[in-house]
């Protein structure tokens, strides 16, 4: 027979009724009541105190063939000629016979051939495309005495405050000032003949036929000749004296010589730049390099930085490029040398090397170049400099080159990627860098690197550090989530490198970030083939089950992991589970997974709050989220009483976070009568009532949820009233009501359940009168909402007041009216 007593409405705070259409307020309320995204701290990356190519944790430390971080460099290690080594292949002779422009004599075909020079021939290898010339010793051009042209002398020997004479200025000077020595009269050489001649060191052509040059239009050859004449003037009057001064000061070895040498190197660099003689355009660059290389033996970091900067500007290649990069790497290993890289263009030169050099030809040079940048990126000032100089854009182009290498260059590409990814990880610390990581598509590029170097633990670990850092920010998290198959790739890496804790913990942290804010990543991850199998496999591996002391490890078993490291992995893994199950299509099957629920319960049983607080809090949060789904197949539902017993130690701990999560779990589990009986029998309700004294909205909200469910049973109402729950609920309503209408509505629901639908009177006269006064004020819409100053939140609070507080408060107000007013 149905009872005629008024029925009070059952409203579990963690089990709201699902409507087909929800307002945004209802969605927010539901999230607050039940499913919560878990947060955790980002894994800490310790800084390697020693600047080496590969840190102490690198797997390459044990490899004998790894590139060294320590080496010695001397002048003898450099090639003065700076020419690439020959291929060693002997060329076969040509079949055709050369044709000469000189007419042959039929009677004596060799009579008309030009005679060889009487003196020795000096041969100089000029820049590519220059015409070679053979000149007799007596036909070398000679310069006039400089005294005859004082204006030229003054311009060439300009002081520090004056600019050196440029090539264009020199090319406009009177060519009559440069004349050749005595030359035997002869026919003018044809263009085809000049192609068979070689350069000499002077690089100055004879200025015969001045009249013809003045009247004929200036062709390419004539213009080139004028520039060569001007370059020779700069060499003889400016560059050569500077080289002599460098050698003289270096030989002196007096105090302050390093400073003077640095100044001379700066002057030399400026002169060559002004005369447009940098790169490979200077014919006598080998003499410059020879002088610079000799200065390296002085072993001065300050001087060597300038030498390296000038050598890179002269476009050294081959062995010299490698040694210059090694020299810069060697200098950058000392933190005290960081200042030497801040006020010059050496970083621009290094970035230029990364852009222009090819991996197959200069792989080792690129390695030491990126290694130097890695060290320098540890300096905050230089890190900002790298960002301003577009280091991220340069890195993106280098990654593209490294992803298309042949198998023979795969090892050196991996070494370079180790250095490059550490540099990018340092750059990720700058907030200004994050939009650049997105715009330059660095995140998908690194995903491609992971696919190609999935066996390389160093590369994978460094990239996981970049992802764990950047995935904490919305724009980077969105870019990462849009990479096709990134979840499948992460799962594969978790499987392949399950023993490498620092890699595993960062991949899991990244997955936790991706699943924290959006439903789509939650479903995509869960639907990946073998997702739960791999996650639970990892859970089993890192579920620390303390073995008895001196227990021998089985053959083939993984080495033991430290307790804190194991807990770090599980914290991140459980967070992924807690975030994934928020999706309505993922939650039910996950709650029905008995292996998953068993592992969560096992963790609660094995760990203590004192040693594993964060882990137990995350496990409780995951159980709370999973307990939201109450399908028949739910393993949480089947094991609810056992879980209630395990969670009790969290509620009774000294950790407020642990108490809060335990209260939330009880808020869901107290829907069941056996769990409510367990709580009342073990006096847990006393502790829940005490939580109402907390100054935290969330703690009070969770405690009210548990009391709402406990008050469903008449015997429990009496116990709660004896413990003083009604008075504490009135105090909470007074303190929190105007600022949190969701909490105010939950308090009213708890008090409504305590009244038993007006059939019982848990409030004394004073409490009843106080509650009536409070509700009278709160039920006045204008009066209730005047406390909200923020206009943006006013609509939200109004919706919460109308939907969550007003209906239950009106019902409660009716129970407080005198009988004559309610009749």
Image (cartoon, rainbow, N blue to C red):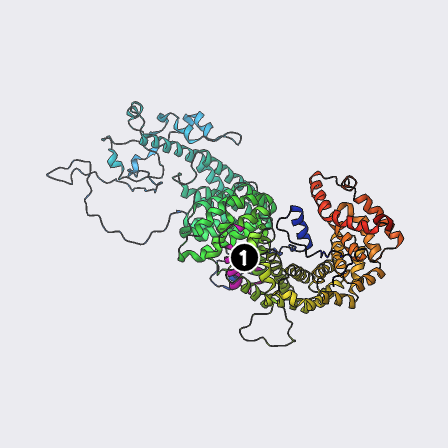
Q: Is residue 331 visible?
A: no
- Above-or-below relation of 256 to 177: below
Q: Please identify the quadrant where the N terminus is shown.
A: bottom right
* Observer-nearest of 669 and 811: 811
- Above-or-below relation of 49 to 738: below
Farthest residue, direction front: 1
Query: What is the chief secondary structure element of the magenta stretch?
Result: helix
- Above-or-below relation of 110 to 743: above
Secondary structure of the residue carrying numbered label 1: helix
Residue 764, quarter of picture: bottom right
Q: Is residue 697 left or right of residue 555?
A: right
Residue highlighted by disc 1: 525
Instruction: Tell me residue 503's x, y (percent).
Output: 56, 59
Instruction: Tell me residue 114's x, y (percent).
Output: 21, 38
Instruction: Tell me residue 719's x, y (percent).
Output: 82, 63
The answer to if 488 sits in the magenta stretch is yes
Highlighted magenta segment, given as a residue range = 481-502
Farthest residue, direction right: 765
- Above-or-below relation of 219 to 329: above
The answer to if 192 sits in the magenta stretch is no
* Observer-nearest of 681 and 471: 681
Instruction: Tell me residue 765's x, y (percent).
Output: 89, 53
Farthest residue, direction left: 107
């Amino acid at each position: 027979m149905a009872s005629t007593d008024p029925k009070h409405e059952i409203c579990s705070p963690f089990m709201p009724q699902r409507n087909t259409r929800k307002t945004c307020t209802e969605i927010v309320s539901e999230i607050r009541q039940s499913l919560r995204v878990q947060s955790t701290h980002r894994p800490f990356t310790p800084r390697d105190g020693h600047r080496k190519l590969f840190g102490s944790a690198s797997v390459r430390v044990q490899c004998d063939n790894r590139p060294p971080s320590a080496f010695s460099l001397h002048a003898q290690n450099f090639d003065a000629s700076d020419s690439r080594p020959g291929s060693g292949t002997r060329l076969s002779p040509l079949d055709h016979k050369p044709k000469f422009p000189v007419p042959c004599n039929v009677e004596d075909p060799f009579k008309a051939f030009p005679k060889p020079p009487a003196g020795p021939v000096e041969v100089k290898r000029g820049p590519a495309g220059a015409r070679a010339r053979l000149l007799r010793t007596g036909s070398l051009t000679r310069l006039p005495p400089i005294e005859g042209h004082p204006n030229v002398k003054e311009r060439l020997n300009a002081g520090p405050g004056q600019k050196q004479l440029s090539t264009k200025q020199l090319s406009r000077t009177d060519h009559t000032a440069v004349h050749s020595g005595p030359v035997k009269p002869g026919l003018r050489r044809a263009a085809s003949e000049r192609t068979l001649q070689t350069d000499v060191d002077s690089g100055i052509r004879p200025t015969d036929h001045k009249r013809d040059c003045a009247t004929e239009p200036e062709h390419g050859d004539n213009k080139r000749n004028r520039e060569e004449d001007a370059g020779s003037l700069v060499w003889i009057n400016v560059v050569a004296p500077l080289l002599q001064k460098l050698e003289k000061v270096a030989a002196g070895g007096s105090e302050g010589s390093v400073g003077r040498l640095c100044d001379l190197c700066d002057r030399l660099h400026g002169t060559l730049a002004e005369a447009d003689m940098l790169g490979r355009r200077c014919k006598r660059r080998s003499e410059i390099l020879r002088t610079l290389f000799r200065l390296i033996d002085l072993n001065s970091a300050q001087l060597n930085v300038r030498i390296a900067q000038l050598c890179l500007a002269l476009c050294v290649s081959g062995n010299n490029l490698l040694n210059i990069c090694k020299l810069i790497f060697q200098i950058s290993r000392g933190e005290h040398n960081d200042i030497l890289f801040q006020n010059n263009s050496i970083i621009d030169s290094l970035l230029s090397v990364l852009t222009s050099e090819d991996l197959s030809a200069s792989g080792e040079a690129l390695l030491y170049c990126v290694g130097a940048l890695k060290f320098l990126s540890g300096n905050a000032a230089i890190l900002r400099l790298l960002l301003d100089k577009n280091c991220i854009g340069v890195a993106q182009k280098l990654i593209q080159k490294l992803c298309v290498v042949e198998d023979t260059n795969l090892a050196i590409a991996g070494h370079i990627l180790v250095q490059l990814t550490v540099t990018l990880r340092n750059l990720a610390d700058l907030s200004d860098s994050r939009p650049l990581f997105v715009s330059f598509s660095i995140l998908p590029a690194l995903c491609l690197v992971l696919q190609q170097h999935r066996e390389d633990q160093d590369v994978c670990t460094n990239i996981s550090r970049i992802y764990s850092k950047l995935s904490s920010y919305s724009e980077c998290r969105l870019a990462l989530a849009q990479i096709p198959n990134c979840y499948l790739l992460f799962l594969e890496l978790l499987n392949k490198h399950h023993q490498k804790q620092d890699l595993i913990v960062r991949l899991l942290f990244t997955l936790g970030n991706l699943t924290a804010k959006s439903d789509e990543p939650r479903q995509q991850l869960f639907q990946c083939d073998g997702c739960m199998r791999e996650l639970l496999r990892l859970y089993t591996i890192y579920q620390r089950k303390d073995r008895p002391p001196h227990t021998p490890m089985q053959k083939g078993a993984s080495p033991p992991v430290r307790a804190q490291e194991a807990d770090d992995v599980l914290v991140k893994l459980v967070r992924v589970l807690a975030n994934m199950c928020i999706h309505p299509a993922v939650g039910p099957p996950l709650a029905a997974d008995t292996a998953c629920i068993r592992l969560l319960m096992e963790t609660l049983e094995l760990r203590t709050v004192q040693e594993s607080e964060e882990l137990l809090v995350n496990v409780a949060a995951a159980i709370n989220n999973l307990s939201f789904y109450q399908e028949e197949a739910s393993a949480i539902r089947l094991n609810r009483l056992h879980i209630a017993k395990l969670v009790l130690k969290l509620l009774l701990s000294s950790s407020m976070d642990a108490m809060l999560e335990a209260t939330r779990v009880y808020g869901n589990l107290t829907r069941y009568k056996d769990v409510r009986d367990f709580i009342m029998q073990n006096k847990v309700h006393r502790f829940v009532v005490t939580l109402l004294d907390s100054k935290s909205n969330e703690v009070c909200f969770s405690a009210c949820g548990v009391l709402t469910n406990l008050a469903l049973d008449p015997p429990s109402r009496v116990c709660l009233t004896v413990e003083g729950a009604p008075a504490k609920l009135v105090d909470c309503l007074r303190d929190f009501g105007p600022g949190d209408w969701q909490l105010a509505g939950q308090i009213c629901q708890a008090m409504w359940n305590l009244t038993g639908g007006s059939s019982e009177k848990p409030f004394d006269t004073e409490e009843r009168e106080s509650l009536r006064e409070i509700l009278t004020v709160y039920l006045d819409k204008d009066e209730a909402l005047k406390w909200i100053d923020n206009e943006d939140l006013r609509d939200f609070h109004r919706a919460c007041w109308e939907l969550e507080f007003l209906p239950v408060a009106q019902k409660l107000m009716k129970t407080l009216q005198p009988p004559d007013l309610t009749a």
